[in-house]
Amino acid sequence: MIVAVTGVILVLFVIGHLLGNLQIFLGPEWINSYAQHLRDLGGFLWAIRLFLLIAVLLHIYYTIWLAIENRRARGSYREREPVKASFASRHMAMSGLIILAFIFYHLAHFTVRVTDPRFALLKADPLNRYDVYSMMVYGFQNVIVSAFYVLAMFLLALHLSHGASSFFQSLGLNDKKLTPRLARIGRVVAWLIFIGYTSIPVAVLLGLVKPAQQL
């Protein structure tokens, strides 16, 4: 139940965050205005971040705990059944830990801005706001950073695609007709999220999105 509830909280954040990030395709005004609105929240924004971080830690902790308990339940005689267990389901804990590592790096990269010295050289935009648009472009011009980002989003999509199937069972919703349909919708949403997030670094690396200011 804890894994399911925290999962829903995090999925809602992931979708909201994606909608905000996709504004980079609308130009500097949109994404810089969005970022400024978030900064105007002040301490409340950090309270939200803390709440989300706690949700992530609880989600990963109990996912690992469930994986350990499931292995213990199988006892000393274990026969693997790769046909019944998907790759995503067998590696939920590991993918969760990699995603957690990515979250910490992502916060250091774009939120605290301590991993790329070029970010400190960016000037304010014409409305005296931090140029988040150019920051994102310069950040994703690093192939290694973009590759890690795409990998994390791929693992997240795998994670969500499996979670979509197990979520309804965790909440006791086992309708034979409705539950499989909702699970399929969940898997489609998971891969749409992957496409949405990865479209940003891919567009930057292809030169389709360029910085608003030169360093």
Image (cartoon, helix red, strand yellow):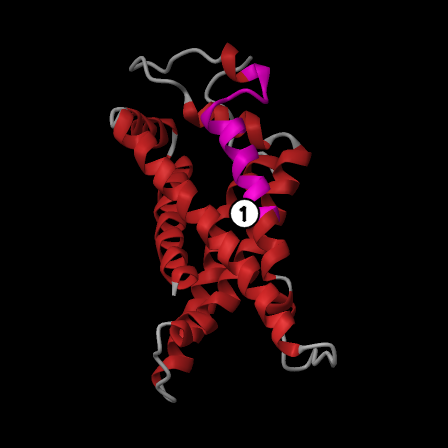
**The magenta stretch spans residue 103:** yes
Percent x, y for residue 68?
61, 64
Please give the residue where the numbered disc 1 appears in the rendered image.
198
Quick check: 103 above or below 90? above
**The magenta stretch spans residue 148:** no
Please, what is the three-letter code of the amino acid marked with disc 1?
Answer: Thr
Quick check: 97 above or below 159? above
Percent x, y for residue 206?
61, 38
Q: Is residue 202 visible?
A: no
Q: Tell how many labels.
A: 1
**Left or right position of 37 against 2:** left
Q: Give me the residue at 56% from left, 47% from top.
A: 99
In magenta, the rendered stretch is 98-118
Q: Nearer the viewer, residue 27 or 137?
A: 137
Percent x, y for residue 104?
54, 35
Q: Give me the residue at 25% from left, 24% from top.
A: 40
**Left or right position of 73 against 110:** right
SS type, badge 1: helix
Quick check: 65 above or below 172? above
